[in-house]
Amino acid sequence: MNELTAKDFRTDQEVRWCPGCGDYAILAAMQSFMPELGIERERTVFVSGIGCAARFPYYMNTYGMHSIHGRAPAIATGLATTRQDLSVWVVTGDGDALSIGGNHLIHALRRNVNLKILLFNNRIYGLTKGQYSPTSELGKVTKSTPMGSLDWPFNPLSLAIGAEATFVARAIDTDKAGTTAVLRAATEHRGSAFVEIFQNCPIFNDDAFSFVRDDKEGVNRIPLRDGEPITWGANAEKALRQRSDGSIEICEAGEEGVLVHDAHHEGAALAFALSRVTQDTHGGTPVGVFRAVERPVYDDLMAEQLATAVAKRGEGDLEALLHSGETWSIT
Amino acid sequence: MSKPVEQLSQVIVRFAGDSGDGMQLTGSQFTSETALLGNDISTLPDFPAEIRAPAGSLPGVSGFQVHFADFDILTPGDAPNVLVAMNPAALKTNIKDLPKGGTLIVNSDAFNERNLQKAAYETNPLEDGSLAEYQLHSVPLTSLTVGALKGIEGVTPREAERSKNMFALGLMSWLYGRPIEPTIEFLESKFAKRPEIAAANVKALQAGYAFGETTETFAVTYEVKPAKLRPGTYRNITGNQALSLGLVAASKLSKLPLFLGAYPITPASAILEELAGYKNFGVRTFQAEDEIAAAGAAVGAAFGGALGITTSAGPGVVLKAETIGLAIMLELPLVICDIQRAGPATGMPTKPEQGDLLMVLFGRNSESPVPVVAARSPSDCFDAAIEACRIALKYRTPVYLLSDAYLANGSEPWLLPGVDSLPDISTTFATEPNDGEDFLPYLRDEQTLARPWAVPGTPGLEHRIGGLEKADRTGNVSYDPDNHDLMTRLRAQKVAGIAGDIPELEVDDPSGDARILVLGWGGTYGPIAAACRRVRNNGRAVAHAHLRHLNPFPRNTGDVLRRYDNVLVPEMNLGQLLKLVRAEFLVDAVGYNRVRGLPLRAAEVADAIEALADQ
């Protein structure tokens, strides 16, 4: 078999995102990363809901389904649960995953179904042309909120951690190396992997993430590297430290108590505290894998139950099943 | 000395008591005992949605009606001949159904001031002469039970008292000559972990039986001879059990693993629970976070090559409409079981109705045809389930399977089919390109118009499908006006074409002289067939046709309808099939419609037929 390349993962369909859309970069990263996985194209499935991001499966030369608004995690659960041999990816957006599909997202995460869920967060409704989304900041002025939005936004990572997610990470659309590293870690994780990708919508919410996308000096990105002290800044002069109340503060890199990142820590408290570190609150944004812990996987458990039932009772026999219970004969 | 035995052709017994009195168990055990005697049986449980409404209250009354006979019967019976009332509330809510002269057995111990008050009786009906027109047997069931259980160690007085339903069952078993051995076996196995409770219940059962023999309250005992049913092996089965077995059979017959997505809802939950027990058949049951996810997961499983099923009742089915629209567009097999219950919104969860027909046909956006199959009796749910799966797999389409709360919980003897006699519903997956070197996911089979089913894992057939309109053949996204018109018509033609693949509508008209046709569908089969028998016994001809397929209709439906002077359509709704046949076939049919949350009564349908004949 010839080695696959990014080209093998492209379809003949014309990509129809707006010029400058962050989705292009994510698609390119995915197409060039896929061949590294060593998973056959035919065993890879992309499932999406509705929204700009949801067009993603049309452009991946794998199996794919562009489904209905918010329901992709549920549909993918049915697929992953019956087909453990597949690599199942869900591509979703902030409206799709957190608004109309919020229920399905949290339940897929708590079950730990073997799914890779990529949330392209642009903090706006793109496909419906510019209404505020559940991640838009309070007071966001849009077509549907001329005097500013009234609802407090979700923090997608805090939500995922609260929903018992076993793998939680963040990447930035234009950061190909960082995105690829996170996707690789997500792929290696057995169970639900949740990845928020900051994605720019140049039409309806341009520059929403310019503080990290254009951050050439690294003054705003806080890279999370497992086993290493969490430091950042042009000269890695800033660091994070945990207060006694569990919250996180900024300190100088050389100070005592600088946090050493541990994504595999069993407890979710530290990962949650890190998810609360934002540009607005701390002047920096953590990027990378926040949490990666092992927990039984829903589809594995279901397969085990089926195998146990067969071991105990033998392969189901239809004739015997129909004749079970109290029967009587008439001659 | 044994008492004289009187022969009866049929009996209808209703057990009624408080929700906590164990009436469903009593009724179903009486049914099991009766089944083993070879009678034909039909049962109807009638219980409140509340698990334990306040004890002794009117809303807390739970009932179970058993009709058994020495001939083939069609319904649980319009009204009981015998009513067993365990407390004043049970008497109050059920006595109106007992014809004058009927046998009434009451637990006199329960007729104390407090219970009488809860049932809104001002005076004690056992003493005020208001029951003079019935054959009243006032039996102190509670104290007799407690007395009989004295000396069984480890049984509290409360537990002893709770065995009174078994005393009542023992008494009824004696009265109608039913063997109690199967119930003893059942109790010993049910309470295997608490032998003292098993012993108490068995003792109560035996005491009730012995009480019948010795007391002077009952002068005679009754016998109902076995019915002349078709030879074969039978078991008693409820609609939900039969439907579950039908789905497991469909999985075996199609050689596809069964995936059920479901969210608990009355009266469909029993299917989820039943199927969860068949893991050794490769059955995967997924209790989803909501109705939408349940349907979605089934579609996902179908995309992966499983037999995808979702089960619910009307209030859940409305939520699935969006997913069913997707399955129509994806052209993937999916079976949606709607166990219909009464009323809009929450309505009356435990009561039957046929109110969802128009919803399942039309309750989706745009032109979105879905085949519809309906079961006609509890055991028929088995065959209907296989038929729904057959159509879904062959035509790559969502299919609705309609049952209702009466079929779901009602039971009847089921002549077990030989596995060899069941249809082959196997299907094939696409494994090769179908257009030179290319794979076209929407290149249709010329005969069925079904598209190929290529499941992930098949090399070379990678493709993307979705809810956006598909280009013919390629399945690519298309906004082309003529393509949309074509695809809309193709989807409609595919479903309409199923008419060529289902049996013609059969008419039951023994004399061949009928000028009136009664057209029914689904769960009203029993009452309508019984009504037609009555009308014929009164010397008039009437024809009966019953639809299993509601979309498409059998190809001869119009011809059949036009053959008669009058067409009567009885339904447990306000005229949904009626509307369809009038629109489709321009036939001036009339309806008979009741929405009482109860099965139609044979007598009222017979009256409606005769009234139409008299016009």
Image (spheres, rainbow, N blue to C red):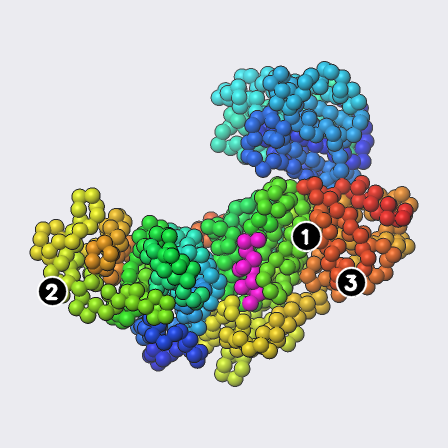
Chain of the residue under the numbered disc 3 shown in the image: B
Disc 3, disc 1: CB below 8 Å? no
Chain of the residue under the numbered disc 2 shown in the image: A
Is residue B237 in view?
no
Chain of the residue under the numbered disc 1 shown in the image: B
Q: Residue B585 carries which label?
A: 3
Is residue B126 in view?
yes
Q: What element carries label 3?
A: helix
Residue B365, position as x, y percentages in the image: 58, 62
Residue that appears at 44% across and 78% down: A13
Please check the rendered image and state whether residue B325 is part of the magenta-colored stretch, yes or no.
Answer: yes
Magenta stretch secondary structure, dominant: helix
- Name the residue nearer the viewer: B513 or B277: B513
Residue B540, position as x, y percentages in the image: 90, 47
Camera-near label (3 vs 2) is: 2
- Name the residue nearer the viewer: B379 or B582: B582
Residue that appears at 69% across and 35% down: B65
Camera-near label (3 vs 1) is: 3
- Name the residue nearer the viewer: B421 or B118: B118
- Name the residue nearer the viewer: B579 or B81: B579
Q: Do labels 3 and 1 share a chain?
A: yes
Range covered by the magenta-colored residues: B318-329
Mark 2, other Cα within 10 Å: few <14 / some 14–19 / many ≥20: few
Q: Which mark is residue A235?
A: 2
Mark 1, other Cα within 10 Å: few <14 / some 14–19 / many ≥20: many
Mark 3, other Cα within 10 Å: few <14 / some 14–19 / many ≥20: some
- Calculate the distance from the C-alpha at mark 2 to the C-alpha at mark 1: 74 Å
Please check the rendered image and state whether residue B414 is part of the magenta-colored stretch, yes or no.
Answer: no
Q: Is mark 1 on a helix, strand or loop?
A: loop
Q: Name the residue under label 1.
A: B375
Q: What element carries label 2?
A: loop
